[in-house]
Image (cartoon, rainbow, N blue to C red):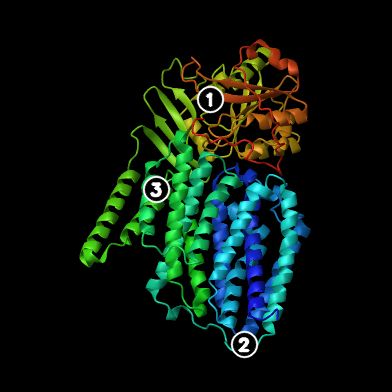
Amino acid sequence: MFWQLNGKYFIYATTIFFSAFLLFAIQPMVGKYLLPFFGGSSSVWATSLLFFTGMLFAGYVYVFLVTSLKPSWQVRIHAALLALAALATLATLLVWGSIYPPYDWAGISTTLPALTVLVALTLSIGASYFLLSTTGPLLQYWYGTESHNEPYKLYALSNAGSLLSLASYPFLIEPFTSLPVQEMVWVSLFFVYVCIAATIVFLYSRLPHAHTGTGTGYGTLARRTAFIWIALAALPSFLLVATTTVITQLVAPVPLLWIAPLSLFLITFILAFRGIGQSTLLPVFVLIAAGYAYRYTPGNPHELPSQILAYLALLFCTGLFCHARLFALRPATAKLPLFYLLLALGGMVGAFLASIISPLVFNDFSEFPIGLSLAAALAGGLLSFPRVMGSQATLFIRVLLVTIVLALSTAFLHTMSDSTVMASRNFYGTVKVVFTGDATTLMHGTTPHGLQPTNPEWSLLPTTYYVSKSGVGRAVLYEQELRSKIGIQVGVIGLGTGTLAGYCRTNDKYVFYEIDPRIADIARTHFSYLEHCESADVRVGDGRLLLENELHSGRAGQYDLLVADAFTDDSIPAHLLTLQAVELYKKHLRSPQSIIAIHTSNRYLELPPVLLRIANELGMSAEVVVLTGSAEPFAKNSEWVLLAEDPTVFDAREFKNIASWESPEKEAPLWTDNFTSLFTVINISPWR
């Protein structure tokens, strides 16, 4: 009785749900693992989404081709794929000891980081991910052709499994388990899945099959229909990557902020493929959401909660609108593999345009305004009106709405400040050099990353977060006073404009570690701090990885001051704030009086408690230096955490008259390379 209709549905549904859960559970895990190798750039996730959508497309191509064969060949080929994927995963574990790419293999890539991300994902989880991506469409096809029931509700169930997986990660998995534990559990569940899938293949092979495969191909499908399927799948995918990029660029490239947009994206699939979203009012909601998002584009850092809400609302309404249209245009079961193939192709195209093409074409994050415009234009073009208006009046209003949307979008995209000297964008984000008359400023995204006055008398004055009363300014002056005769050695992770080199004296040496090759060129071309410091050395690559390589090769920096000041827009890469990272910094210090200075100024994250916990673990003294309302020229409010082995360091006169910082009552969790949690430090309240 188990293999009768209800039992058949149960086993197919369970397996599809389970495979979708595993398919999306691995995404935040491997994305989080890869972040440190690429400077914590938010582009890691955008590129990872391209891999995931691309591999999904490859899986759907496989299903389309396999289902065109006789059932006996379908069974043989899929059984072989199960065996190959299981063996490949086992081989990865035996060779590397992990399904993650090996640490030393990932290394440092500054020329083609996006390609390196794709290669790393392919070599590590490519085989297992490909197998999982084939499960949903193949089992839906098998179920539909054998039971003669419409199988599309299983697609909604598949997305429900994906959503449960994503929702579990930031709330249940990440806060309580380390990356190695997550990996161990996932691998174990993957092999359980292989056994279940093999059982289904065996049971399916025992059934009498009346059909002989689809054997249809593209010839029986109108090109217009194929294009519509692809386009309706591409737009939400494009908007998903664009929305995620903007949000993570502003706050932090962490799983919590990856998962929110992706979860909404999946919810739209679930609702649409359950028949929800066919209302004629839905285009109106898309237009309202587009107007709301337009209000916050480009975003204001002080309106972050409203901005995120507006962007997510647009993503949700657009996704539901497009996916509901896809459901309304769904074909019969015989063409299900082709339908899913073209949906996956659209998803991959959208992700490719947003993650790879946009950084090559645009100097700014223009993909979100473009996605917003396309969504509004599509909704306006498909807006429904009462029949009494007539077809000509309806067409006129639709064309008028689309024209208005495109005109506003074109004007917005061509709006550029006259003060911009140069602008560029790559894997590591958008950089602009802005001239305002009295100063030249380096902007990374929406955040200043250094400023140099144009007045020659002030041109070498440390400004912004680095003034003499800031945490790092006090640390430099202390070390200079302590070693006034021999000079000091300073290591800085993150170059910016090279402002700290403004403190450089004749005998001092400054070494800057910078992952983005553009910044080194900009610092020397548009700013003169590095030119002032003859001994300044810029080393291109991720600062932490370079420091580790130098330590392993016996070239410890022997720094009197080691500064961690690497930001992506306003977010600090988490791998620079872990126990292992600070322990590495400590090994590069010259003496117990040497200082580690970590820049924690941030709009949305309370990071000092994390570093105080790490200092306590390492037996170091710590001081939080908060500067507000400084009278120094071109000063900005700043927050630095200073650490030293010798507790008497902070008794020196350079650290007197520091504004008090209120330590939280609850101790922060210990951040390590295998465990970080954003929940304990995030603060996006409107008044912050």
Residue 241, horizontal then vertical, whole percent: 50, 52
- Name the residue tied to disc 2: 209
Which of 160/540 is in front? 160
The image shows a total of numbered marks equal to 3
Residue 436, horizontal then vertical, whole percent: 38, 27
Separation of disc 2 and disc 1 at Cα?
73 Å
Badge 3 density bin: few <14, some 14–19, many ≥20, Cα 10 Å: many
Numbered tag placed on residue 369 in the rendering: 3
- Name the residue tied to disc 1: 499
| Disc with the residue nearer the chain's start (2 vs 1) | 2
The label nearer to you, 2 versus 3, is 2
Which residue lies at the image location 61% right of the left edge and 61% below the top edge? 161
Which residue lies at the image location 46% right of the left edge and 33% below the top edge? 302
Residue 498: tell me if it is visible.
yes
Disc 2 marks a residue whose amino acid type is His
Separation of disc 2 and disc 3 at Cα?
51 Å
Q: Relative to 41, is 117 above or below? A: below
| Disc with the residue nearer the chain's start (3 vs 1) | 3
Disc 3 marks a residue whose amino acid type is Pro
Which of 631/22 is in front? 22
- Picture quadrant of residue 658: top right
The label nearer to you, 2 versus 1, is 2
